[in-house]
Image (cartoon, rainbow, N blue to C red):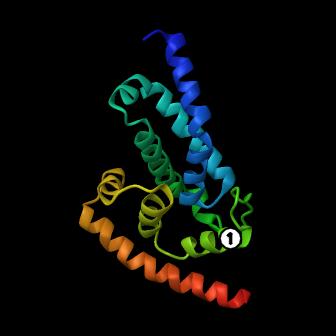
Amino acid sequence: MKRRDRDAEFSEFVAAHQRQLRRFAYSVCGDWTQAEDLLQTALTKLYVAWPKMRSRGVEHSYARRIILRATIDEKRRPWRRESPGLEGFDHPAAPGADIHERDELITALAQIPKRQREVVVLRHLVGLSVEQTAEELGLAPGTVKAHAHRALPRLRELLGESLSERN
C-alpha cells in the first residue's frame, strides 16, 4: 500500500470514528481533557499499526484496547493518584441526550469499580457482545457476565436515587 493511500484511508477512519472513540475514552476515564489525550495516544499507535490492523479488520477493537490500556497506564502514574477522579468534570451533552441524565449516568459509573465500569461501557454504551468485551478486556466471558451482573443492579440503584432526588 502506498503511503498516500494509507494516509487517506487512515484519515477517513479518523474522520468517521473520532467522535465515537472520544466518547468511549470519556466513558472510561470521566475527564474530557484526559479523553482527548487518550484518543491522541490511540490514534498515534493505530497509525503505526494501520496496515496490519486494517487488513485484519480490527482497527476499532485495537483503538479501544489502546484507550483502555492507556487509561490503566495513566492511573499508575504518581501524579494521577492525587486527582479527584470524576468529581467536578464538565462535558458537552450528546445530541438528543438530556444533560442531567448524562451527568447522572457518569456520576453513577464513577461509583462502581473500574472493571465493572469498563464492562458496562463496552457492553451497553459501545454495544459489544459478551465475547467481544471479554476479548477487549482480556477476561473470560463468564467474568464479563459476572461484572455486568454486579454492576447493573448497583447502577439502577444509583440512578434510581438520583432520579428520585430530582423529582
Badge 1 local density, few (<14 within 10 Å), some, or many (20+)? some
Q: Quadrant of the N terminus?
A: top left
Tell me: 71 left or right of 90: left
User: Is residue 94 shown above or below 59?
Assistant: below
Q: Is residue 157 above or below residue 105?
A: below
Three-letter amino acid code of the residue under disc 1: Asp
Residue at 51%, 82% (x, y): give it: 156
> Which image quadrant for residue 83?
bottom right
Taking the view exactly as shown, the residue that stands out farthest to the front is 96
Q: Position of residue 46 (x, y in %)?
A: 47, 32
Residue at label 1? 103
- Which residue occupies 49% across, 75% down? 112
Q: Residue at x 61, y 57 (%)?
A: 79
Nearest the eye: 96 or 70: 96
Image quadrant in which you'd find residue 145: bottom left
Q: Position of residue 88 (x, y in %)?
A: 73, 69
Residue 142 against residue 4 in the figure, above or below: below
Identify the residue at image location x=50%, y=11%. Answer: 3
Q: Position of residue 106 (x, y in %)?
A: 61, 69
Q: Tell me: 68 left or right of 146.
A: right
Dot 1: element: helix
**Residue 110 position in % (x across, y down):** 57, 71
